[in-house]
Image (tube, helix red, strand yellow):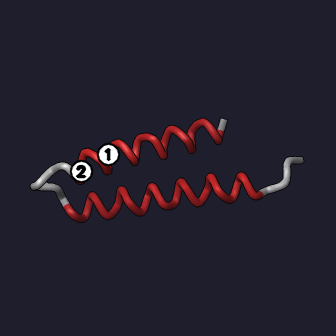
Amino acid sequence: MQDYVNHENIRRYEKLIAISEGDPSRDEGRHQTLLRLLAEERAKDVRRDDSPNT
């Protein structure tokens, strides 16, 4: 279940970042927050892939 949530978060952040990048009047602070959140979700995904299956 956590994998599903993680992947959905990644998809959502990618979508919001793409919208933000195309907006000439974007809020730079919000954009940076989205980039940070995306990086955190991707890091969780990598850590889970590296962990042994028990």
Q: Amino acid at mark 2?
A: Ser
Quadrant housing residue 2:
top right
SS under mark 1: helix
Point 55% across, 55% down: residue: 42
Mark 2 Cα-neighbour bin, 10 Å: few <14, some 14–19, many ≥20: some
Residue type of the residue flagged with mark 1: Leu
Q: Residue furthest left?
A: 25
- Determine whether label 2 and label 1 are within 8 Å by CB: yes
Q: Nearer the viewer, residue 30 or 52?
A: 52
For disc 1, the neighbor class at 10 Å (few under 14, some 14 to 19, many from 20) is: some
The x and y percentages for residue 39 are: 48, 60
Callout 2: SS: helix
* Position of residue 8 in the picture relative to residue 3 (left or right): left
> Relative to the observer, which residue lies in front, 51 or 2?
51
Position of 2 relative to 28 (above/below): above
Residue located 25% across and 45% down the image: 19
Please report the residue visible at 79 percent of the width from the left and 56 percent of the height from the top: 51
Tell me where residue 45 appears, x and y as whole percent: 62, 52
Q: Residue at x 52, y 60 (%)?
A: 40
Quick check: 39 left or right of 25? right
Q: Position of residue 25 (x, y in %)?
A: 10, 55
For the residues labelled 2 and 1, the Cα–Cα distance comes to 6 Å
Asked whether, in this view, residue 49 is left or right of residue 26, the answer is right
List x then y, in percent, for residue 35. 38, 60
Residue that carries the numbered disc 2 in the rendered image: 20
Residue on which disc 1 sits: 16
